[in-house]
Amino acid sequence: IGERIVTYIKTTPRTPTGGLNHFGKWWASAVYPQSLWVDSLMMYDIFAARWATAFADKPLTDFAARQPLIFARYLQHPSGLWKHAWYTDQQQWAPQQDIFWLRGNGWVMASLPEVLDALVERYRAVAQDRIKSAGDGLAVYEETGLDRALFENHGAKVVRAVDNLVAVDVP
């Protein structure tokens, strides 16, 4: 099954900047064409990094190393937090308001250290910086309670699972 996943990762359509299109070849890519979603770092990049390391697959190692940098370029807000999605055709975040999906940010915090272990040296410092800025952004929201007010005011349930996901990255 691992080989099928690797084939999928290697052959799935990319965004113009080289990010793996979130919906790949699935029918939903017709609805959400050319999009990057924060979920994808957790869903495929950890696997790609581990497989590439285990089987000395240099192209897959480079791919796995570049993904967090591509995703950070489009999904990371100046606050350090990560937006849920980026639609390349519209050149916009989803949602457009300063609303952050905390579980998605938790996935970033959990996945980046995993990928970091497999990164080639030239990507390591930038990835470490992305982890730090995401953690700083989450800390501000946690300390001020803005996460609770922000999500409750927009009718969404507050997701506290981010605490458990972020705990893996706190020294």
Image (cartoon, rainbow, N blue to C red):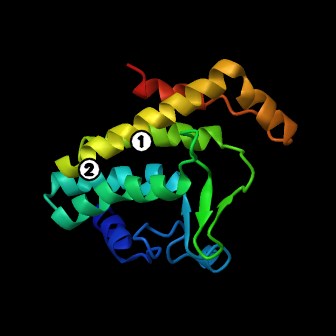
Dividing the picture into quadrants, the one containing residue 51 is bottom left
Q: Residue 77 or 14: which is nearer the viewer?
A: 77
Three-letter code, disc 1: Arg
Q: Reading the chain from its start, which is encountered first: label 2 or label 1?
A: 2
2 and 1 marks in contact (CB < 8 Å)? no
How would you rate the neighbour count of disc 2 (Cα within 10 Å): few for under 14, some for 14-19, many for 20 or more?
some
Where residue 13 is drawn, which disc sits there?
none
Where residue 130 is drawn, which disc sits there?
1
User: Is residue 95 placed above or below 126 in the rendered structure?
Assistant: below
Left or right of 7? Residue 22 is right
Residue 38: image location, x then y, percent: 54, 52
At x 69%, y 33%, the residue is 159
Three-letter code, disc 2: Tyr
At x 54%, y 54%, the residue is 75
Mark 2 to mark 1: distance in Å?
11 Å
Left or right of 93? Residue 15 is left
Residue furthest front in the image: 78
Please indicate, yes or no, whether residue 130 appears anywhere in the rendered image.
yes
Dividing the picture into quadrants, the one containing residue 92 is bottom right
Left or right of 132? Residue 100 is right
Where residue 123 is drawn, which disc sits there?
2
Please indicate, yes or no, whether residue 165 appears anywhere in the rendered image.
no
User: Is residue 128 placed above or below 31 in the rendered structure?
Assistant: above
